[in-house]
Image: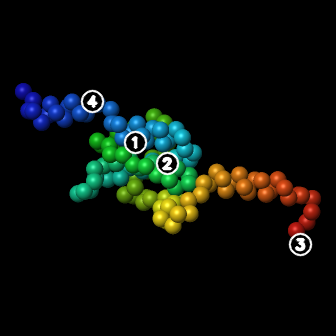
Amino acid sequence: MASFGDRIRAFFSKRSNPALAELDVFAAERKGVEGYIEPRTATNPTSLLLVDRDGDHLRAPVKEPEDGAAFCSKRSIPVYDAQVIGYPKRMKEFDKRRRSGAIGSLDKDIAELEKRLAQEDPGTPDN
């Protein structure tokens, strides 16, 4: 006979993780998303971190690392072990910009660059 704790764990393991629903929306709305599996620590559970190409990120707890890898695989998102390769530089830079209040969008920067390139006359040599 299963213990009360085993029954409770079984009940919650069958339910969908609402935090993963947030990651699903994040992944669908962003470009260049990569996944990072973060190991369990004394204060935090195992989690899946998603980072977009701007460096914006969102994390959610997962039961097992394999659950995070399956989430990414199902959505064709590359997934890495954060403990092995670390975090992307763009994420750290995004946090720095967020703290300074200078958050811009990479999409806006690319659009501005394309606009400037289109305005330049390619036939004139640079001096």
27 on left or right of 19: right
Q: Residues within 10 Å of mark 1 (few under 14, many from 20)?
A: many
Where does label 1 land, which residue?
A: 69
**Which mark is in front, 3 or 1?**
3
50 on left or right of 64: right
54 on left or right of 40: right
Tell me which amino acid carries mark 2: Glu
Tell me which amino acid carries mark 4: Lys
- In the rendered image, the vertical position of residue 105 relative to residue 3, given as above or below: below
Q: Which mark is residue 37?
A: none
Note whether residue 107 is visible.
Answer: yes
Q: In whole angstroms, how far apart are the C-alphas of marks 1 and 4?
A: 18 Å
Report if the CB atoms under discs 4 and 2 are less than 8 Å apart. no
Q: Residue at point 91% right, 66% down?
A: 125
Q: In whole angstroms, how far apart are the C-alphas of marks 2 and 1?
A: 11 Å
Q: In whole angstroms, how far apart are the C-alphas of marks 4 and 2?
A: 26 Å
Q: Residues within 10 Å of mark 3 (few under 14, many from 20)?
A: few
**Chain-order first, disc 4 or disc 3:** 4
**Chain-order first, disc 2 or disc 1:** 2
